[in-house]
């Protein structure tokens, strides 16, 4: 049933099905992670709580209509019922789609998070820019056995009161193996920090040797040889002039 | 492949005409004030230009309040690709680029491009943290390319000098 709705909705709303792909060049490893099915349960519960109010209002309206027996009240209740059923259906479909379209791709140097059912957002960041990785878990989330991994980059303040979201962070919502993912990202982080010469002071010595590739060093030697050759050529050219054998400069 | 990609990106100057359609529909969110919302958006569309070169992006727009943003690829931290329903229907997308600035909103929003996917791949290939290690991939090593150019220059000078000695 849902698969049918999904295929129709996906065509209608031009939804991306399947994981986002990374540019094919030079990724030593690409891991695609999904959110836990229990995140879906959690989201259903949250959505249901949000709908309790409208269902309650509909119920009250129906009771009042039954008590009064007014025709127009029944008509109002009918319209209300259609609206409430419609909202419920849309809410559950979007909740399900939000779960189904959620993908986290971890490569050896970058992270891509795709989320959203109506507005589709894809965040790409390289581990070079990551400042810290943390795990957040609420009580209900703990009960269900999943957590959120938050990856933050430099800068940016959020202000939840004004509804300003911090866009300098990526959140891997609802993953079961949060610790493993955090360790994975931390390991990648360590590698790229060492390469960039950032991070802890004792990383720097290592980075200076790794920054110059063997090919670069070989090329520097070539340049040295060429420069020597050039000096010899210049010297050879200057010597006859010093001897007084003048040649017309052409 | 990356050179072909860069060549295509460097050619981008103007947003797609579909952006105007997006702005038009968007401005209906203003209901009766729709013309007031649409007019500035119309001029934004009319004046919006992008310029991608080897080092960075330059974007400018506006007539009364002119804005021009320049940022270098090397400072890019996060790339957000956002596609709303309308944008997906029209086949365009918004690429938002973040640097380590204090603001929580995007540093630069590149709106109305049909080549959003290509652009993101391009930015991804040039953003911070992409070129720190490229051992073994000689053609992508920019330092090595520069060094090779220096060597070839030196060789050419030497050869030219030696050739003239024989005259």
Image (cartoon, coloured by chain):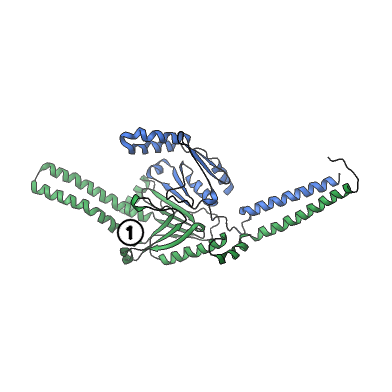
Tell me residue B137's x, y (percent).
61, 56
Q: Residue at left 81%, top 53%?
A: A232
Tell me residue A111's x, y (percent).
47, 57
User: In terms of secondary structure, where does tag 1 sit?
Assistant: helix
| Quadrant in the picture for residue A137 | bottom left
Left or right, A142 with respect to B79, comes to left
Q: Residues within 10 Å of mark 1 (few under 14, many from 20)?
A: some
Output the letter for the chain in blue.
B
Residue A59 visible somewhere in the drawing: yes
| Residue bearing the label numbered 1 | A40
Position above or below: B46 against A206 = above
Residue B1 visible somewhere in the drawing: no
Output the letter for the chain in green.
A
Which of the chains bears the disc numbered 1?
A: A
Tell me residue B59's x, y (percent).
50, 41
Where is the C terminus of chain B found, in terms of image quarters?
top right
Q: Nearer the viewer, residue A109 or A240?
A: A240
Position above or below: B20 against B139 = above
């Amino acid at each position: 049933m849902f698969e049918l709705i999904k295929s129709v909705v996906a065509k209608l709303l031009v939804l991306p099905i399947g994981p986002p792909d990374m540019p094919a060049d030079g990724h030593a490893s690409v891991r695609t992670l999904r959110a836990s099915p229990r995140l879906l349960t959690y989201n259903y519960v949250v959505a249901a709580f949000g709908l309790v109010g409208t269902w309650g209002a509909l119920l009250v309206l129906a009771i009042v209509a039954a008590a009064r027996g007014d025709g127009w009240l029944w008509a109002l209740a009918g319209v209300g019922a259609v609206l409430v059923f419609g909202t419920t259906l849309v809410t559950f479909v979007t909740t399900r789609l939000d779960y189904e379209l959620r993908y986290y791709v971890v490569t050896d140097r970058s992270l891509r998070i795709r989320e959203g059912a109506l507005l589709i957002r894809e965040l790409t960041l390289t581990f070079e820019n990551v400042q810290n990785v943390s795990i957040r878990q609420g009580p209900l989330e703990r009960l269900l056995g999943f957590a959120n991994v938050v990856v933050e980059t430099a800068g940016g303040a959020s202000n939840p009161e004004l509804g300003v979201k911090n866009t300098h962070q990526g959140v891997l919502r609802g993953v079961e193996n949060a610790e493993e993912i955090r360790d994975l990202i931390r390991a990648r982080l360590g590698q790229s920090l060492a390469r960039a010469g950032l991070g802890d002071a004792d990383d720097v010595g290592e980075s200076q040797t790794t920054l110059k590739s063997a090919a670069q060093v070989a090329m520097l030697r070539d340049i040295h040889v060429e420069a020597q050759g050039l000096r010899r050529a210049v010297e050879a050219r200057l010597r006859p002039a010093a001897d007084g054998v003048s040649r017309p400069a052409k | 492949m990356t050179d072909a990609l860069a060549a295509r990106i460097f050619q981008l100057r103007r947003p797609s005409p579909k952006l105007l359609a997006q702005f038009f529909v968007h401005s209906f969110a203003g209901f009766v004030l729709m013309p007031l919302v649409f007019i500035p958006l119309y001029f934004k569309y009319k004046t919006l230009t992008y310029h991608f070169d080897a080092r960075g992006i330059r974007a400018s727009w506006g007539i009364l309040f002119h804005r021009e943003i320049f940022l270098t690829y090397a400072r890019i931290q996060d790339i957000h690709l956002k596609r709303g329903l309308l944008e997906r229907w029209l086949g365009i997308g918004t690429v938002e680029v973040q640097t380590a600035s204090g603001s929580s909103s995007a540093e630069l929003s590149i709106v109305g491009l049909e080549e959003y996917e290509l652009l993101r791949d391009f930015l991804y290939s040039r953003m911070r943290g992409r070129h720190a290690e490229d051992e073994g991939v000689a053609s992508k090593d920019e330092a090595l390319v520069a060094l090779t150019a220096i060597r070839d220059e030196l060789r050419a000078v030497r050869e030219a000098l030696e050739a003239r000695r024989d005259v």
